[in-house]
Image: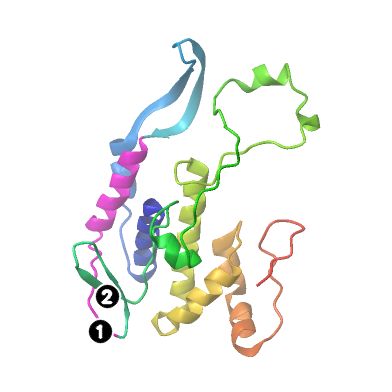
């Protein structure tokens, strides 16, 4: 997501320079209450849920953006042998790496997949509703349900945004360890290996071994993935 790209920008900047922490002082810009009340369609109160941090998603985006600008991060023009992108206003930006904010349905999907993904209807309709967990437990025997629906990994969910931020942070760590002379190797390493849970620490612990696998073919077993699943290159 765009937020993850800004997160990468901030993380990469932090790995290259000494900075003074100042992000949390923008906390009040997007924090608006400590609890959320859940209603039915006709405004009957179902429950009140307390959160350690309730935020406005739009304001959070803007906070990341402001902090990126305050860090003084600028785009530097290099030469025509570097990576580049042309914006809609025909402005050409040239850099070492392009991080694509890949939302569902954006044009960047053509670059990632090689084709435009077309949505296919399953014929089903999903009605998404919130209610207190204790109510459903009275009527359902959850262990007997053959499957359950979890929230989709789309940029509108907090969980997927967290995953996207972790993914961008790990890319910044790869680039930090590899250095500017090994950018292509760092990117290759990241996208082959990073099926991660504790990704940042795993990178620090195993980077040299995996680079030896890429360059010399020395066997390396990736254990940083879903339990009981063998990660295939």
The x, y position of residue 60, in whole percent, is 34, 43
| Residue 74 counted in the magenta span | yes
Is residue 20 shown above or below 139? below
From the viewer's perspective, tell me whether residue 151 is left or right of residue 10.
right
Rendered image: mark on residue 94: 2
Is residue 160 shown above or below 57? below
Q: Residue at x 31, y 62 (%)?
A: 19
Q: Quadrant of residue 96?
A: bottom left
Is residue 160 visible to us here? yes
From the viewer's perspective, tell me whether residue 158 is left or right of residue 64.
right
Rendered image: mark on residue 202: none
Q: Residue at x 30, y 36 (%)?
A: 28
The x, y position of residue 202, in whole percent, is 60, 66
Q: Earlier in the sequence, mark 2 or mark 1?
A: 1
Of 154 and 180, which appears nearest the observer?
Answer: 154
The residue at which mark 1 appears reads as 79
| Residue 191 counted in the magenta span | no
Disc 2 to disc 1: CB gap under 8 Å: yes
Q: Residues within 10 Å of mark 1 (few under 14, many from 20)?
A: few
From the viewer's perspective, tell me whether residue 14 is left or right of residue 125.
left
Q: Residue at x 57, y 32 (%)?
A: 125
The x, y position of residue 189, in whole percent, is 55, 75
Range of magenta residues: 56-80
Q: Residue at x 28, y 57 (%)?
A: 68
């Amino acid at each position: 997501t765009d937020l993850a790209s800004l997160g990468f920008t901030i993380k990469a900047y932090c790995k290259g320079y000494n900075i003074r922490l100042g992000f949390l002082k923008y906390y009040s810009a997007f924090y608006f209450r400590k609890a959320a009340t859940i209603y039915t369609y006709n405004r009957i109160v179902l429950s009140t849920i307390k959160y350690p941090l309730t935020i406005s998603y739009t304001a959070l985006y803007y906070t990341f953006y402001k902090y990126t600008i305050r860090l003084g991060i600028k785009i530097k023009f290099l030469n025509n042998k570097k990576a580049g992108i042309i914006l809609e206003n025909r402005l050409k930006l040239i850099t070492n790496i392009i991080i694509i904010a890949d939302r569902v349905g954006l044009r960047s999907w053509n670059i990632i997949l090689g084709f435009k993904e077309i949505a296919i209807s399953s014929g089903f309709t999903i009605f998404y509703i919130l209610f207190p967990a204790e109510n459903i437990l009275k009527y359902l025997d959850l262990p007997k349900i053959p499957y359950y629906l979890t929230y989709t990994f789309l940029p509108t969910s907090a969980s997927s945004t967290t995953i996207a931020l972790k993914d961008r942070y790990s890319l910044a760590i790869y680039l930090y360890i590899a250095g500017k002379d090994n950018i292509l190797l760092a990117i290759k390493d990241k996208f082959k290996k990073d099926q991660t849970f504790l990704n940042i620490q795993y990178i620090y612990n195993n980077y040299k071994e995996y680079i030896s696998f890429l360059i010399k073919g020395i066997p390396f077993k990736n254990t940083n993935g879903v339990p009981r699943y063998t990660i295939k290159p």
